[in-house]
Amino acid sequence: MSLAKIARHIKPVPPDKPEYHYAMYEKAFRDKREEFRDIFEIGIAFGGSLRLWKEYFPNADVSGMDILDRSDTVPEGMTWYQGDQSKLDDLARIMHKEYDLILDDGSHVDWHIQFSLAHLFPYVKSGGYYVIEDLDCRRGLNLDGSCIKTRHVLKYLTKGQRFESPAITESQMEYILEHTESCYTYRSVCIIRKKS
């Protein structure tokens, strides 16, 4: 069954993602369905995405985090953590293994997105993927306004060029550049593949 069809059947609340997300994910991950063992998502909301990933990747351990208490919405048998993606202590407390797929569907604030990428990309397995959703969402402020747009960071990353961001240190940027195999953005979704 296709990812879009699975999504439409998720109960009690289906994931709130545009149709083109499913087509993009289907194309990127179709051949990985049986291979992926560990998936982590930032932003749980009502648990629909966690259910979707568990059904689409049947052999995967699916877990996630949210800034709010989502204990009533997380599917039974799945691990979830309450934490803030912009807090290093929370990320360090949660990250304890590598993942085939990490998805950022969290705050959608540029600084938070870039901070999470810098700190979580090392936890993506070789040949794994890091996904950023909803790049065009205008939620919240970028702290003091000094943070560049995540789209600009991703343009540099696609070209393998250095960039500056107050949310990413020099050594983190070097790591991301050195370990990125590909970076593809379509509309408001970016899929970064880590080198094998």
Image (cartoon, rainbow, N blue to C red):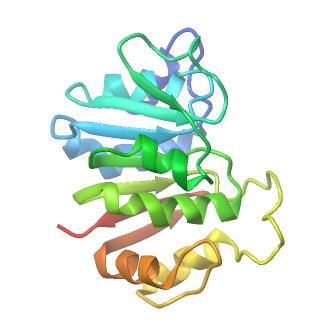
- Quarter of the image where one finds residue 196: bottom left
- Of residue 130 and residue 26, the one placed in the foreground of this image is 130
The spot of residue 21 in percent (x, y) is 51, 45
The spot of residue 15 in percent (x, y) is 56, 27
The spot of residue 72 in percent (x, y) is 59, 11
**Can residue 14 be seen here?**
yes
147 left or right of 41 in image: right
Residue at horizontal 34 percent and vertical 39 percent from the top: 39
Count of labels in the image: 0
Residue at horizontal 22 percent and vertical 40 percent from the top: 36
Residue at horizontal 67 percent and vertical 29 percent from the top: 68
Eyeballing the image, is 47 above or below 130? above
**Can residue 1 be seen here?**
no
- Of residue 66 and residue 100, the one placed in the foreground of this image is 66
Residue at horizontal 42 percent and vertical 82 percent from the top: 171
Eyeballing the image, is 29 above or below 15? below
- Quarter of the image where one finds residue 16: top right
- Quarter of the image where one finds residue 46: top right
Eyeballing the image, is 103 above or below 145? above
54 left or right of 187 in image: left
Q: Quadrant of the N terminus?
A: top left
63 left or right of 186 in image: left
The spot of residue 118 in percent (x, y) is 48, 67
